[in-house]
Amino acid sequence: MTIRKVVLSGLVSGSLLCGGILLAQKPPRNVSPRRHPNLAAAQRFLDAGAVRLHVVDLDAARGVPLTQSADAVGRIVALCRDAQRDVQVGGGVRSVNGALGWLRAGATLVVLGSVAVRDPDTATAICAAADGRVLLGLDVRAGVARVQGWTEDGLTASELVTTWRAWRAAGIVYTDTTRDGLMIGPDLEGLRTYRELYRGAVYMSGGISSLADIAACADGGAAGVVVGKALYEGRIDLAAALLALENPS
């Protein structure tokens, strides 16, 4: 099994860290009631050996940023920075100043969502200003990119990915939104399609529920996987997963 990163997912809303636990087919405002204080959850991930966290500000992603959510993300970024671990931040990153602010605060990468779909001029300016320390969020339902916290449709996913090839970015994070939070397995066919179109690093998110799912993503050529709900539900033991990746059979 060869894969570069298991990335731990955290969705921040109202100063709480929620590990990829969206209710079935609902927009991100409907987070599961199983919530976890953000720093405690992040610290548990780091203590188990996580080398990168994936944190999303849900309120900012929906276009209604809250100071308490931004502050919660900031505390997680500072925790990772002080622990010398990577952290990538998404949700509401829609300007050069916003992106650079997170990078200066200690984020390793920023994740662009809606702006990468709706405003390519701003998105490419962010990519250039950030020196490529950008991931492009490809959130897809039925072949169409979802934006504004998954509440609205954008362009076709294939059109986007083909355009993104020319952008100065570190890769894309592909999420099949019909699978996210359901732990029914990743969209491996989508992984194959978007790897062929993008010709760069593709990180997988959505539906991952087991070590077998992680292995399947690795075999499919994923640069990494984002794991959230399966950790909180106890279906994946993080330390065991990391050990399996370090010592493939």
Image (cartoon, rainbow, N blue to C red):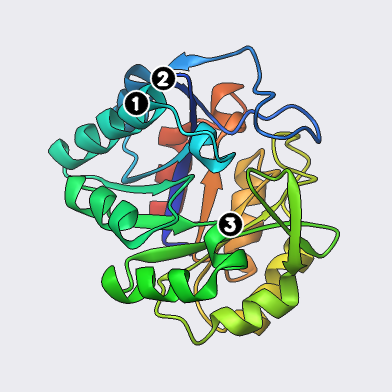
Tell me the residue at 26%/57% (across/down): 100
Q: Which mark is residue 45?
A: none
Q: CA distance from mark 1 to mark 3?
A: 21 Å
2 or 3: tag closer to the N-terminus: 2
The foreground one among 242 and 221 is: 221
Amino acid marked by disc 1 = Ala
Q: Does 69 appear above or below 172? A: above
Residue designated by label 3: 114
1 or 3: tag closer to the N-terminus: 1
Task: Determine the secondary structure under disc 1.
Answer: helix
Extreme-left residue of the structure: 82
Could one spot residue 247 in this view of the protein?
A: no
**Residue 159 percent coordinates (x, y):** 72, 79
Task: Determine the secondary structure under disc 2.
Answer: loop
Q: Residues within 10 Å of mark 1 (few under 14, many from 20)?
A: many
Report if the CB atoms under discs 1 and 3 are less than 8 Å apart.
no
**Residue 69 percent coordinates (x, y):** 41, 26
Extreme-right residue of the structure: 142
Could one spot residue 44 in this view of the protein?
A: yes
2 or 1: tag closer to the N-terminus: 2
Residue designated by label 1: 72
Q: Residues within 10 Å of mark 3 (few under 14, many from 20)?
A: many
Tell me the residue at 74%/69% (across/down): 155
Q: Which mark is residue 15?
A: 2
Q: CA distance from mark 2 to mark 3?
A: 22 Å
Amino acid marked by disc 3 = Ser
**Residue 220 percent coordinates (x, y):** 65, 69
Foreground mark, 2 or 3, reads: 3
The foreground one among 237 and 70 is: 70
